[in-house]
Image (cartoon, grey):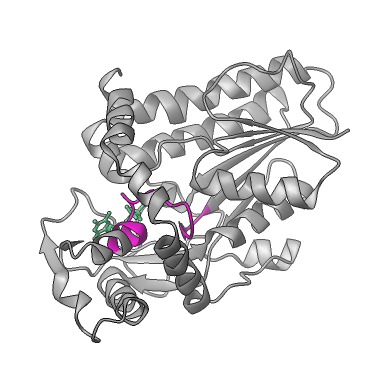
């Protein structure tokens, strides 16, 4: 029986990947691990899908070491566990490392896009930690012949996204009539992909990708932050029965993020042409679904923004 370990399956993207794999592959055993322990003795894993990571750039600026511990050391621990457990029995197994487009740095020329061969140029502690983990994954492929595959994805959005990230933070603040903090001039550009389309891409790459290869995943959907926030304000005004323009009054320009990357944009042609994937949800559909999910899951938002959860979350940082 195929038997896959998914790390970070309680996180935003990971929870959508677990849902997809459990529904699509009822004959595959899925083990979700959300804090790194060695389960390789207990299960003879045929695959690992490694999503577990610290992912928020602003947190990485205030606590870089947490990102080294989780993203670099955590990945190397898992690589070691797979290498040891699979030694001499690698055939038919796969270590899939899920990464980010931020490892490529920032773009200035509007006609330029990140491709799989773009030189790594990480510029934040977060992207430096992910770049480092990507390098280790490739090194294990080259040195120990570990069967690996890597994907680098653009910004995700959708249900279950922690409200420290732009889209859920804005939705939550609009709902509560709180200021909408736009960093700098709001000119930075991100390429947004609906999280379920990312989970579909991970499924395709896990099953059909080639060992040692990298696949870029992106939504071909670039937005300046300020335009995106205006769009969200309009959708929220409509959903909340407010006059158009009401929520936009909450927009507040704040001090820019240190070292703020100007633009990320992925060229996903390799994945589309070689493996036949393409985004299935338009931005309008995806954003509407996302807003509706947050408006009907206030209990989830209250829970993750509660003192109890924050205390737990901050406590994890304080112990490092
Ligand atoms: P974020 O969701 O943190 O993702 P990333 O930094 O990994 O791309 O931020 C997306 C963009 O939104 C980024 O350019 C920073 C900006 N931003 C704001 O302007 N205000 C905010 O409160 C946040 C969280 C982000």
- Seen as rendered, the residue at the extreme right is 1
Whether residue 116 is visible: yes
Residue 50 vertical position relative to residue 82 in the rendered view, above or below: below
Q: Position of residue 32 (x, y in %)?
A: 63, 32
**Does residue 274 appear to the left or right of 258 in the view shown?**
right
Q: Position of residue 233 (x, y in %)?
A: 28, 75
In the image, residue 154 lies in the stretch drawn in magenta: yes
**Does residue 313 appear to the left or right of 45 in the view shown?**
left
Tell which quarter ligand 1 is in.
bottom left
Q: What number of labels is visible?
A: 0
State the extent of the magenta-drawn residues as a range. 153-170
Q: Position of residue 187 (x, y in %)?
A: 23, 70
- In depth, the one of 20 and 272 nearer the eye is 20
**Would you identify the image quadrant in which residue 226 lies?**
bottom left
Residue 128 vertical position relative to residue 81 in the rendered view, above or below: below
**Does residue 237 appear to the left or right of 78 in the view shown?**
left
Residue name at image x 57 percent, y 56 percent: 216
- In depth, the one of 244 and 281 nearer the eye is 244
**Does residue 250 appear to the left or right of 301 in the view shown?**
left
Whether residue 123 is visible: no
Residue name at image x 14 percent, y 76 percent: 249
Residue 106 vertical position relative to residue 64 in the rendered view, above or below: below
Viewport quadrant of the N terminus: top right
């Amino acid at each position: 029986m195929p038997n896959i370990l998914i790390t970070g399956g309680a996180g935003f993207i990971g929870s959508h990947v677990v849902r997809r794999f459990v529904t699509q592959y009822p004959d595959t055993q899925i083990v979700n691990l959300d804090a790194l322990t060695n389960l390789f003795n207990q299960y003879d894993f045929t695959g690992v899908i490694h999503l577990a990571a610290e992912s928020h750039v602003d947190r990485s600026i205030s606590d870089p070491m947490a990102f080294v511990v989780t993203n670099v050391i955590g990945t190397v621990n898992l690589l070691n566990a797979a290498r040891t457990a699979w030694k001499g029995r690698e055939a038919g197994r796969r270590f899939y490392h899920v990464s980010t487009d931020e490892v490529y740095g920032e773009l200035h020329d509007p006609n330029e896009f990140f491709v799989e061969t773009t030189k790594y140029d990480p510029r934040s502690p977060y992207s430096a930690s992910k770049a480092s983990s990507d390098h280790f994954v490739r090194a294990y492929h080259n040195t120990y012949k570990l069967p690996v595959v890597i994907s680098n994805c653009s910004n995700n959005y959708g249900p279950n996204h922690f409200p420290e990230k732009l889209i859920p933070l804005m939705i939550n603040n609009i709902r509560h009539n709180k200021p909408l903090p736009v960093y700098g001039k709001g000119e930075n550009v991100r390429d947004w992909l609906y999280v379920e389309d990312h989970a579909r891409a991970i499924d395709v790459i896990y099953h059909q990708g080639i060992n040692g290869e990298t696949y870029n995943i992106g939504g071909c959907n670039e937005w300046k932050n300020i335009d995106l926030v205006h769009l969200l304000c309009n959708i929220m005004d409509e959903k909340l029965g407010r006059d158009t323009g009401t929520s936009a009054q909450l927009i507040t320009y704040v001090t820019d993020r240190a070292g703020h990357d100007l633009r990320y944009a992925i060229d996903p042609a390799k994945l589309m042409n070689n493996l036949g994937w393409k985004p299935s949800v338009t931005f309008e559909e995806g954003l509407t679904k996302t807003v509706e999910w947050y408006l009907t899951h206030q209990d989830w938002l209250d829970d993750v923004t509660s003192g109890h959860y924050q205390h737990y979350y901050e406590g994890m940082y304080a112990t490092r």
